[in-house]
Amino acid sequence: MKILIITLSTIACLVYTKIEQNPTTNSTTEVVIGSSFSLVNDTKEKVSIHTGRGFVSLNKGSKTSITCNVGKTVSWANKGKKGDAIFKITSDMCGKTIKLSKVMD
């Protein structure tokens, strides 16, 4: 009886196991977890931005820390609404201090 139950359990597990023999695509996803970068407002005016997680006002010369979510967009903000994109976060930004004037193309 025990052998019958073990055999049926094994067969049931094998039925739900999918083996992919010919993978059709090779894709890589870059994820940086637990890292951040600093954004410094080196412009001559106060700016408001949306960091992907919330709104931040930066006075002239101030800086903020932004989580390094590769692929997320940092945008302008106007009266609590998200505006045009400033830049997209890349992995080479992580752990560095970025000047706003350099990414404002």
Image: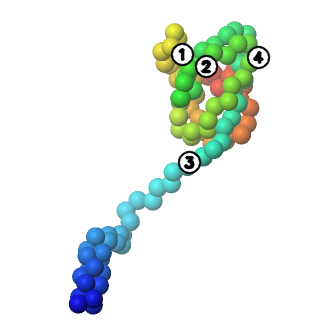
Q: Are marks 3 and 2 in contact (CB under 8 Å)?
A: no
Q: Position of residue 45 (x, y in %)?
A: 69, 9
The residues tagged by marks 1 and 4 sit, at their Cα atoms, a distance apart of: 18 Å
Residue assigned mark 4 = 61
The mark nearer the N terminus, 2 or 4, is: 2
Name the residue nearer the viewer: 2 or 24. 2
Q: Is residue 91 above or below residue 83?
A: below
Q: Position of residue 60 (x, y in %)?
A: 73, 13
Q: Which mark is residue 77?
A: 1
The mark nearer the N terminus, 3 or 2, is: 3
The mark nearer the N terminus, 3 or 4, is: 3
The residues tagged by marks 1 and 2 sit, at their Cα atoms, a distance apart of: 8 Å
Q: Secondary structure at mark 1?
A: strand
Q: Are marks 1 and 4 in contact (CB under 8 Å)?
A: no
Q: Quadrant of residue 100?
A: top right
Question: Dot 3, crowdedness within 10 Å: few (<14), some or many (≥20)?
Answer: few
The residues tagged by marks 2 and 4 sit, at their Cα atoms, a distance apart of: 14 Å
* Residue 7 visible here: no
- Tell whether 71 sits left or right of 21: right
Name the residue nearer the viewer: 35 or 22. 35
Q: Position of residue 85 (x, y in %)?
A: 52, 23
Q: Amino acid at mark 1?
A: Ala
Q: Quadrant of the N terminus?
A: bottom left
The residue at 49%/18% (across/down) is: 82
Q: Are marks 1 and 2 in contact (CB under 8 Å)?
A: yes
Residue assigned mark 2 = 56
Q: Amino acid at mark 4?
A: Gly
Q: Amino acid at mark 2?
A: Val
